[in-house]
């Protein structure tokens, strides 16, 4: 650790203890007691405790809980005064949202109409209430709700009256109803499809009970020769059955559709082929491109999988055609610009390809690095042109939102701390972002430090963006298990942002986000008797267990960091299944991972590992780091069969 960094840590300690309301104090206990009372809706207890936290940095939260406890009984003047006083906190919008729901529930539409425009966060339920109010004086207002109709999930009950109005006026047509039925069925929301179908003509032929049977098992319906194809409902049920089967058995679904398709319209035939192709591509079926060729107009999501299927088969003309068919908004995403350039290069249109690569090469992402390498460049760490002074840090630490965020984080109220931090950084420039990131680093808010430093546009500090707070312990673990430190650092950055106590919604814990089953398996392999799950957030234990597991899957997956990274996120069985029958670029493997979370995870871990390596004094191109993926084989499938 450098002397400069030690000075900053000392400064941070002074900052956090001298700023009003930030240091741990008796008020903490009173504040937490108020929070507990609020959960019980105990207004009397809240009122008793409030005098103990007067002037405390988190007093606004206690006042928010007090206001919310009897919100429906408070006069508008009192609520408006409180909202005005807290206008610069996230609490104002939270309370206004709470109040608007009370106003809607009690039909106080005049007050609702006056307060609604001040709400800053998007809320569909309240938006539909607002449209109901406006509809009384603006007959065309309901049309603004039309886009809300075209989703496959349930919408709030407040939208139903608006939808009914649009249906009554013919502004949502029967064809629009069929469209939403399809969207709901595609999303697996059978209950939504059944409710929406009630707006169809009575002679639609759609049997609502049949949809549930198809969802559970589509094959019997597809085998039934009595399917009524003379009605739209019968044909839509057939398409749903084919689409449902395609999720797990696209070739079987295609065979059924070959039989049934002649009895359907051109649009219905093409739509079903598009769905079969989409799910086939996600399962890496070699026939997916043939099925796509029989489809009609494809959505952007379907075109994305057409590109991925074409990449795995090295069919560059189809890659280019699919990207060019995307909407402008979708096609301008860096992913598709990069693969369009690769297709142009493969098709001997090098000048066009180079122009795209050069434009992408300034970006510090996975595809930005690959584009940089395409134009002969090498990844460099940008120079640090700004370091916050002591006064910069003091000024940042004096901001009320930052003080509240630090205090909330200290009390492990991380969701609230995040909201405060986001509000404080909303309009921040590069230097404010770097100052705040430094302050967060010193306060142990490593996730905020990384995410804040990651947002800078022109001035950067990659030491903050790619920090490694527990490097001594990490070095010991990676040396013990013979792993690349940069790779493991990047994986931890993606898993937990170096928050040692991090807990995921699915039960993973610690720096390397280990699941209980994985941790128990590692403990058994290491021969640790009496090991307890409560030990998993211990930094050394977590790093040792995570590194052991990562080394194990790395050994069993051809020593490929890309395969091992995918396995760490989604499981080794899936990482194996996603291989192809031929050797392929690791970038193509990563891009064609069916799970969006894992696809994004692998690209970020591998791309960021390059920067960690540079910071640690190791120069290596991303292309060399990720390499190639070897073909799938029965022997390889067995290699990690017993691994969780």
Image: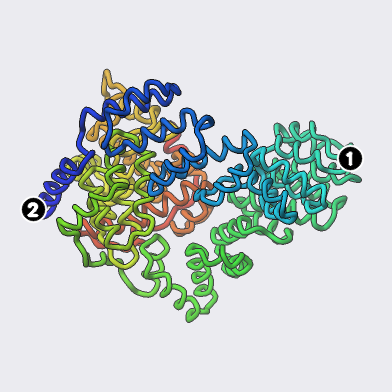
Q: Position of residue 546 (x, y in %)?
A: 31, 37
Q: Secondary structure at mark 1?
A: loop
In this view, the residue farthest toward the bottom is 351
Q: How many marks?
A: 2
Q: Which mark is residue 3?
A: 2
Q: Which residue is at a point 77% across and 49% down the rendered structure image?
A: 166
Position of residue 158 relative to residue 437, above or below, is above
Q: Position of residue 39 (x, y in %)?
A: 43, 25
Q: Which residue is at a point 20% across and 31% down the rendered structure image?
A: 25
Using a 10 Å C-alpha cutoff, classify the residue at mark 2 as few (fewer than 14 neighbours), some (14 to 19) or many (20 or more). Answer: few
Q: Work out whether residue 286 or residue 387 is closer to the camera in this orientation and state it.
A: 387
Q: Work out whether residue 446 or residue 69 is closer to the camera in this orientation and state it.
A: 69
**In the picture provided, is 617 more to the left or to the right than 579?**
left
Q: Secondary structure at mark 2?
A: helix
In this view, the residue farthest toward the left is 3
Q: Quadrant of residue 181?
A: top right
| Distance between the alpha carbons at the discs numbered 2 and 1 | 79 Å
Position of residue 346 relative to residue 491, above or below, is below
Q: Which mark is residue 202?
A: 1
Q: Position of residue 412 (x, y in %)?
A: 31, 34
Q: Position of residue 596 (x, y in %)?
A: 51, 49
| Of pointers 2 and 1, the one earlier in the residue sequence | 2
Q: Which residue is at a point 39% across and 44% down the rendered structure image?
A: 86
């Amino acid at each position: 650790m450098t002397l400069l960094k030690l000075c900053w840590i000392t400064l941070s300690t002074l900052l956090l203890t001298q700023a009003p309301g930030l240091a741990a104090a008796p008020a903490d206990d009173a504040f937490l007691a108020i929070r507990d009372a609020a959960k019980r809706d105990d207004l009397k207890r809240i009122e008793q405790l409030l005098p103990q936290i007067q002037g405390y940095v988190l007093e606004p939260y206690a006042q928010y809980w007090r206001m919310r406890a009897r919100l429906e009984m408070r006069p508008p003047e009192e609520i408006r005064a409180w909202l005005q006083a807290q206008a610069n906190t996230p609490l104002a919008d939270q309370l206004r949202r709470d109040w608007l729901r009370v106003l809607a529930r009690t039909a106080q539409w005049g007050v609702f109409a006056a307060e609604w425009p001040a709400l800053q966060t998007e809320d569909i339920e309240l938006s539909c209430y607002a449209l109901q109010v406006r509809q009384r004086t603006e007959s065309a207002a309901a049309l603004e709700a039309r886009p809300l109709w075209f989703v496959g999930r349930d919408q709030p009950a407040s939208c139903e009256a608006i939808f009914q109005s649009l249906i009554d006026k013919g502004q949502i047509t029967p064809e629009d109803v069929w469209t939403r039925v399809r969207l709901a069925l595609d999303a697996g929301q059978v209950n939504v499809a059944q409710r929406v179908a009630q707006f169809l003509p009575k002679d639609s032929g759609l049997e609502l009970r049949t949809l549930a049977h198809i969802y559970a098992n589509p094959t019997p319906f597809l085998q039934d020769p009595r399917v009524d194809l003379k009605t739209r409902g019968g044909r839509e049920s057939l398409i749903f059955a084919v689409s449902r089967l395609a999720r797990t058995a696209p070739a079987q679904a295609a065979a059924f559709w070959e039989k049934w398709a002649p009895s359907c319209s051109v649009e219905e035939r093409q739509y079903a082929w598009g769905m079969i192709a989409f799910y086939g591509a996600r399962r890496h079926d070699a026939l997916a491109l043939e099925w796509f060729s029989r489809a009609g107009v494809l959505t952007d999501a379907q075109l994305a999988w057409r590109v991925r299927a074409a990449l795995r088969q090295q069919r560059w003309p189809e890659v280019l055609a699919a990207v060019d068919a995307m909407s402008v908004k979708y096609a301008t995403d860096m992913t598709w610009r990069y693969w369009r350039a690769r297709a142009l290069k493969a098709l001997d249109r090098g000048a066009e390809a180079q122009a795209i690569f050069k434009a992408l090469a300034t970006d510090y992402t996975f595809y930005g690095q690959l584009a940089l390498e395409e134009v002969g460049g090498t990844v460099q760490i940008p120079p640090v042109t700004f370091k916050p002074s002591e006064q910069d840090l003091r000024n940042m630490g004096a901001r009320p939102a930052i003080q509240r965020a630090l205090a909330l984080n200290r009390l492990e109220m991380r969701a609230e701390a995040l909201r405060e931090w986001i509000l404080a950084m909303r309009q921040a420039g590069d230097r404010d972002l770097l100052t705040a990131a430094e302050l967060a680093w010193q306060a142990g808010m490593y996730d905020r430090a990384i995410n804040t430093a990651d947002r800078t546009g022109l001035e950067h500090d990659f030491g903050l963006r790619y920090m490694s707070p527990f490097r001594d312990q990490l070095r010991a673990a990676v040396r013990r298990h013979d792993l690349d430190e940069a790779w493991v650092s990047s994986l931890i950055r993606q898993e937990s942002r170096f928050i040692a106590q991090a807990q995921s919604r699915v039960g993973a814990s610690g720096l390397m986000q280990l699941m209980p089953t994985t941790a128990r398996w590692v403990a058994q392999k290491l021969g640790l008797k009496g090991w307890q799950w409560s030990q998993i957030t211990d930094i050394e234990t977590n790093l040792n267990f995570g590194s052991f597991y990562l080394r194990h899957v790395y050994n069993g997956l051809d020593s490929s960091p890309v395969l091992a990274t995918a396995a760490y996120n989604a499981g080794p069985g899936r990482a194996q299944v996603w291989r192809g029958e031929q050797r392929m670029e690791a970038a193509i493997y990563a891009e064609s991972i069916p799970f969006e979370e894992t696809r994004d995870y692998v690209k970020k871990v591998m791309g960021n590992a390059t920067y960690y390596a540079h910071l640690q004094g190791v120069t290596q191109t991303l292309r060399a780091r990720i390499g190639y993926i070897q073909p799938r084989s029965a022997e390889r499938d067995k290699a990690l069969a017993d691994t969780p």
